[in-house]
Amino acid sequence: MERIDVAVIGAGVVGLAASAAIAARGLSVCVLERHARAGLDTSTHNSGVIHAGLYYPAGSLKARLSVEGRRLLYDFCEHHGVPYTRCGKVVVATRDAEISQLEALLARGRENGVEGLTLVDRDFVRRREPHVRAIAALYSPHSGTVDAEALVRALLRVAKDRGVIVLPGSPLVGAGTTKDAIALQTTHETIAARQVVNAAGLYADTVAHSLSAEPFTIYPCRGEYAALVPSRRHLAHGLVYPLPQTHSLGIHALKLFNGDVWFGPTARYQTDKDDYERDRLPVEAFLEPVGRIFEGVRLDDLRLAGSGIRPKLHPPDVSFADFMVRRDRQNTRVVHAAGIESPGLTSCLAIGRLVSDIIAEES
């Protein structure tokens, strides 16, 4: 049986960031990943947006860790050569009745400590996005985008440089307890860890059950995207958002690093945690929400693009659940980093720091 100070389950951006932060404290760390390589699920199936932190309830982990994480992420990208843009974004109002919602969003963002937020007029939006319908907007200058796959590779390098052992193709298949550790059974070996970080994304609830931790439920919610055909990419230049919806931030526009322009994501709860493609929405489903904001978009301008699945901690009839980043109440050797949906990519380094602090309390 191999022995380790801390085992992290899940090699997404949160698991890798947590493992690197823990290893920086001088603890021995391994990461168990069910896939053949890191970051294949939620970490790279998303918009790649760096959020400023303006959407989330004041005092929530999502608000605090988004603001902190955004600053850390820009610095990390700069120092490790991860492609990113600090392009800013506009959240647009298309009707007079929506102005009050923009003002409320401005107030929430300022309460969360987001810098530089301003209400802007139609002319401001037109200068940035000539094809956007807007009578006003909230401008967030510190929002941006990151190449999520490059971020995963950089976090993996940093973790390994700090001595983290990453074990791909090693799903957790069982767990037990010894006098001073949790015995983690993979398909290849047994690892005894004094503490375990549950950063298993869509399967965090299944992992919690295996670890005899407190029960909770992850609700998979699929988001789908459409893209502009190459000849029509000039219709959108950057990050353009509608006002937020119940279960997502709405179908927004973003420009990828390869020049593609995507619209999305939608939000649909489902039971299968690995099904990205079955019963995809037709491309026609994107025309109305995209056309509500962008002038001149025709059905022939759109094609289906990627999809992702959010690991939500709340069912469809509930509108919000915070990140779960804390020690388990039932099995105190376990620390959860669960329910890490948006703004999880933005927050990953801040979540990693927080997990590391919690681990250190018992080390």
Image (tube, rainbow, N blue to C red):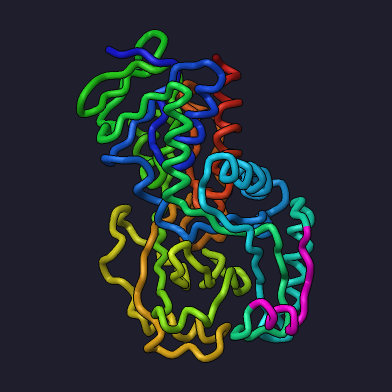
Residue that extends furthest to the top in the rendered view of this protein: 179
Q: How many marks?
A: 0
Q: Is residue 76 above or below residue 280?
A: above
Is residue 351 shown to the viewer in this render?
Answer: yes
Asked which quadrant contains residue 170, the reply is top left
Location of residue 29 in the rendering, given as x and y in whole percent from the top left corner: 43, 22
Q: Is residue 69 left or right of residue 101?
A: left
The one of 24 and 326 positioned closer to us in this rendering: 24
Q: Residue at x 72, y 68 (%)?
A: 139
Q: Residue at x 60, y 74 (%)?
A: 242
Is residue 64 shown to the viewer in this render?
Answer: no
Asked which quadrant contains residue 8, the reply is top left
The one of 321 and 86 positioned closer to us in this rendering: 86
Quadrant location, the N terminus:
top left
Magenta highlight on residue 270: no
Q: Is residue 331 above or below residue 221?
A: above
Q: Residue at x 41, y 85 (%)?
A: 301
Q: Is residue 247 above or below residue 281?
A: above
The one of 334 and 148 positioned closer to us in this rendering: 148
Location of residue 175 in the rendering, given as x and y in whole percent from the top left corner: 31, 24
Q: Is residue 177 left or right of residue 128?
A: left
Magenta highlight on residue 119: yes
Residue that extends furthest to the left in the rendered view of this protein: 187
Bounds of the magenta segment: 116-128
Location of residue 199 in the rendering, given as x and y in whole percent from the top left corner: 44, 37
Q: Residue at x 44, y 90 (%)?
A: 298
Quadrant location, the C terminus:
top right
Location of residue 224 in the rendering, given as x and y in whole percent from the top left corner: 40, 68
Q: Is residue 149 above or below residue 227?
A: above
